[in-house]
Image: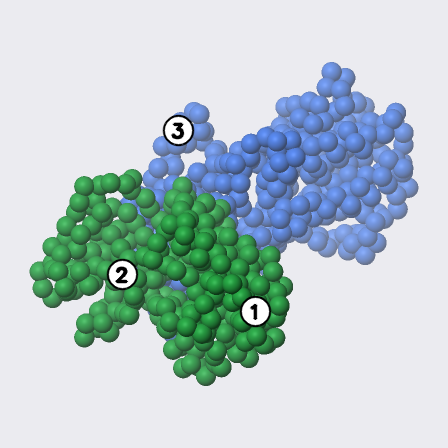
Chain colours: A green, B blue
């Protein structure tokens, strides 16, 4: 559950991980709103190496809101080494926040902290990560909880889609590119799994809401509308404007389902309106393919 | 003893309704409370709670009711009930301090041979821990239902009695008083069993409602109608005609929440499995937000500057109570929007909204609104004509979780109708 503290603009937002998919969209939105920003890229401070915490602390001010987006995403690896590197990033940020406390911290976590035993996820769902990536995010959440005295918001985000995504994970963005480049969308099994996909525009706006309200607590970032990969591929194929083959494959893993109860978002930000999937897909297609 | 004199200590919902029902059954009742102002209002005929038939029954049997703040009256009584409502917090925890104080007062002020009866809801272990040597202490399970308090107190379906030693006969005065309520079956058991019996009853009710909520939601997703299924279940002897199978907006009112919290606490302390109880609590939390989810889906995400009309603020019909009311929970999540409310009993000031409009009637409430949401099943709402609703609304959405209105008639009037248990 998220508790909103105020409704004022932060003095400055420090964004760690500003060059990623979510980072770029958030930077654009915050700049558009005239919010002072400090973006710190890995070229400036490599948060995964020794001494990074001290360097980061030097850049922080007491009135800052720190948005931690930096993470090696699953497409870079779900192995132990990648998780360890991500944990070092978390450790460096925690060290910086101990040395130089700030006014607000927002951690961009992942729905990978949840397992698949519970198919309808809400903020009250128990965590049960099934791989190193999910475990890493949970550990980073705990690191920040243990050191941050200011309001701390943890945002557990489901799969994000939209133009400009660099991850190319199994889902809307990869399907769209495959449909146009290859005329073929390969599916795992018959694409029976249900997943939630949230539009990048909505993610950035929810991050903005959290920053503007100095929110504290836990919020899942999801649209509340799940769809099977088969239906998703069908939507994308039908919108491609050319014949696209949807190619099932022999099933290798058990079918899993995931749905989100997003009443937590409705209560935290009653006026927020989610972008419907069809419109988000159309906007992404137009932005990326013209 | 055929005509015992009986006192009730604590003139809140439970004590007042029980005492008035005792008068209705022909007994002379002492109605005691330490709140002098409350006693003055009661003596003036002003009832502090809303219950069907309460005012009329109290007026009819006024000569048998002695409202007093003087504890000396307790010495004249053969049976002294201690029956204040036990307040609960948001987590269902009980505040027993008022009960403790009044029970101590009853022991001190009543005769040594008087029977002291705790009627308030207490956790297992309370009665034995408060027993005094040489005194009669009994725990009687209260069966109050908001909106039916008088009827159930006049005609209890059974009376569950907790005593120190179940093999001992009940005191004559106490038994005469119980038998004077239509000779209900008397179930005598040890204190701890009676204390847990109340929790057990409520757990069975919550389990049934959770089943109904779970299946009603699925009905709406697959084209079934829960209302068509319920009669089939009620004809099953293992389920029964009076089973709680109406889907709802989560448990509310405070009492069920308290029992679930007590059960979870005891299970945690004693190391017994309570996973299913936690699942009921989670189901209730989810069910409570059905109207909010529906409202977002069909109005709030689609209409700019929407206006919402909410009928009903009480947690259910025929009561003034708003404890854990789904209506107030909904309104609390509509902060940025225009909201109008109307409840026959509860004032609009109870609504947690910065600029709620207090309507003077049902139609005034819905005038110009994009959606009508009926959150409490007040009987008078059933008489609303769909055509009048259609004419009053700006939009065409009616959200009626409890199916107060006739779905077919509402749809025939050209309105979009949303209820629990069907799509």
User: Left or right: where does residue B119 sit relative to residue A186?
Assistant: right
User: To which quarter of the image does residue B164 belong?
Assistant: top right
Classify mark 3: residues with Cα within 10 Å, few (<14), some (14-19) or many (20+): few
Q: Which numbered disc, 2 or 3, marks the residue closer to the eye?
A: 2
Per the image, label 2 sits on a secondary structure element best described as: loop
Q: How many marks?
A: 3
Can you see residue A113?
Answer: no
Q: Disc 1 sits on a residue from what chain?
A: A
Q: Which numbered disc, 2 or 1, marks the residue closer to the eye?
A: 1
Give the camera-side residue of A213 and B244. A213
Q: Measured from the top left, where is residue B21 in percent x and y?
A: 69, 39
User: Left or right: where does residue B381 sit relative to residue A198?
Assistant: right
The residues bearing labels 2 and 1 have C-alpha atoms spaced at a distance of 34 Å
Give whichever of discs 2 and 1 has the lower sequence position: 1
The residues bearing labels 2 and 3 have C-alpha atoms spaced at a distance of 55 Å
Residue topped by disc 2:
A168
Give the camera-side residue of B10 and B182. B10
Residue most extreme to the top: B167
Per the image, label 1 sits on a secondary structure element best described as: helix
Can you see residue A51?
Answer: yes
Q: Measured from the top left, where is residue A161 in percent x and y?
A: 30, 63
Residue that appears at 45% across and 83% down:
A34
Residue that appears at 45% across and 45% down:
A128
Quadrant in which the N terminus of chain B is drawn: top right
Residue most extreme to the bottom: A34
* Disc marking residue A54: 1
Q: Which numbered disc, 1 or 3, marks the residue closer to the eye?
A: 1
Residue topped by disc 3:
B235
Residue that appears at 72% across and 27% down:
B191
Classify mark 1: residues with Cα within 10 Å, few (<14), some (14-19) or many (20+): some
């Amino acid at each position: 559950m998220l508790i909103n503290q105020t409704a004022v603009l932060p003095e400055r937002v420090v964004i760690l991980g500003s060059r990623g998919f979510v980072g770029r969209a958030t930077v654009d939105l915050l700049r558009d709103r005239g919010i002072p920003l400090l973006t710190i890229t890995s070229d400036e401070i490599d948060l995964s190496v020794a001494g990074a915490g001290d360097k980061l602390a030097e850049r922080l001010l007491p009135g800052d809101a720190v948005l931690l987006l930096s993470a090696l995403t699953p497409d870079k690896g779900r192995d132990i080494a990648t998780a360890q590197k991500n944990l070092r990033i978390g450790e460096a940020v925690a060290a910086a926040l101990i040395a130089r406390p700030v006014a607000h911290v927002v951690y961009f976590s992942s729905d990978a902290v949840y397992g698949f035993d519970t198919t309808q996820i809400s903020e009250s769902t128990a965590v049960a990560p099934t791989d190193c990536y999910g475990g890493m995010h949970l550990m980073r959440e705990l690191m920040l909880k243990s050191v941050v005295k200011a309001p701390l918001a943890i945002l557990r985000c489901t799969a994000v889609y939209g133009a400009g995504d660099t991850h190319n994970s199994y889902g809307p963005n990869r399907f769209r590119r495959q449909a146009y480049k290859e005329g073929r969308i390969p599916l795992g099994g018959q694409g029976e799994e249900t997943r939630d996909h949230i539009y990048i525009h909505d993610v950035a706006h929810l991050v903005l809401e959290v920053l503007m309200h100095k929110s504290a607590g836990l919020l899942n970032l999801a649209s509340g509308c799940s769809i099977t990969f088969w239906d998703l591929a069908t939507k994308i194929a039908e919108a491609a404007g050319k014949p696209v083959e949807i190619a099932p494959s022999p099933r290798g893993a058990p079918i899993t389902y995931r749905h989100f109860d997003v009443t937590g978002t409705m209560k935290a930000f009653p006026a927020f309106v989610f972008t419907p999937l069809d419109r988000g897909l159309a906007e992404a297609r137009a932005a990326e393919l013209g | 003893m055929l005509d015992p004199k009986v006192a009730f200590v604590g003139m809140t919902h439970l004590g007042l309704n029980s005492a008035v029902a005792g008068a209705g059954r022909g007994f002379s009742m002492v109605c005691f409370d330490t709140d002098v102002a409350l006693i003055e209002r009661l003596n003036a005929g002003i009832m502090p709670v809303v219950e069907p038939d309460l005012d009329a029954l109290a007026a009819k049997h006024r000569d048998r009711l002695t409202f007093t703040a003087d504890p000396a009256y307790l010495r004249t009584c053969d049976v002294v009930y201690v029956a204040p409502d036990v307040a609960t917090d948001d987590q269902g925890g009980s505040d027993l301090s008022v009960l403790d104080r009044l029970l101590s007062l009853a022991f001190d002020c009543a005769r040594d041979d008087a029977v002291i009866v705790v009627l308030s809801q207490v956790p297992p272990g309370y009665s034995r821990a408060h027993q005094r040597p040489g005194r009669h202490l009994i725990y009687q399970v209260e069966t109050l239902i908001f909106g039916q308090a008088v009827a159930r107190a006049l005609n209890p379906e059974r009376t569950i009695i907790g005593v120190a030693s179940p093999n001992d006969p009940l005191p004559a005065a106490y038994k005469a008083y119980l038998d004077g309520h239509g000779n209900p079956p008397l179930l005598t058991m040890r204190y701890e069993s009676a204390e847990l019996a109340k929790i057990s009853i409520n757990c069975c009710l919550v389990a049934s409602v959770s089943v109904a909520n779970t299946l009603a939601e699925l009905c709406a997703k697959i084209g079934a109608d829960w209302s068509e299924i319920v009669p089939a279940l009620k004809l099953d002897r293992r389920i029964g005609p009076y089973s709680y199978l109406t889907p709802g907006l989560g448990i509310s009112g405070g009492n069920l929440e308290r029992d679930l919290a007590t059960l979870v606490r005891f299970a945690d302390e004693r190391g017994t499995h309570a996973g299913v109880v936690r699942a009921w609590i989670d189901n209730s939390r989810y069910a409570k937000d059905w109207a909010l989810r529906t409202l977002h889906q069909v109005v709030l995400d689609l209409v700019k500057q929407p206006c919402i009309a909410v009928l009903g603020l009480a947690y259910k019909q025929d009561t003034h109570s708003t404890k854990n009311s789904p209506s107030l929970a909904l309104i609390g999540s509509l902060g940025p929007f225009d909201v109008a409310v109307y409840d026959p009993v509860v004032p609009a000031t109870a609504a947690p909204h910065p600029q709620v409009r207090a309507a003077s009637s049902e139609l005034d409430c819905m005038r110009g609104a994009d959606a009508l949401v009926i959150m409490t099943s007040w009987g008078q709402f059933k008489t609303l004509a769909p055509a009048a609703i259609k004419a009053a609304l700006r939009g065409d959405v009616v959200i009626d979780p409890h199916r107060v209105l006739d779905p077919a008639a509402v749809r025939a009037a050209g309105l979009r109708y949303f209820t629990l248990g069907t799509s």
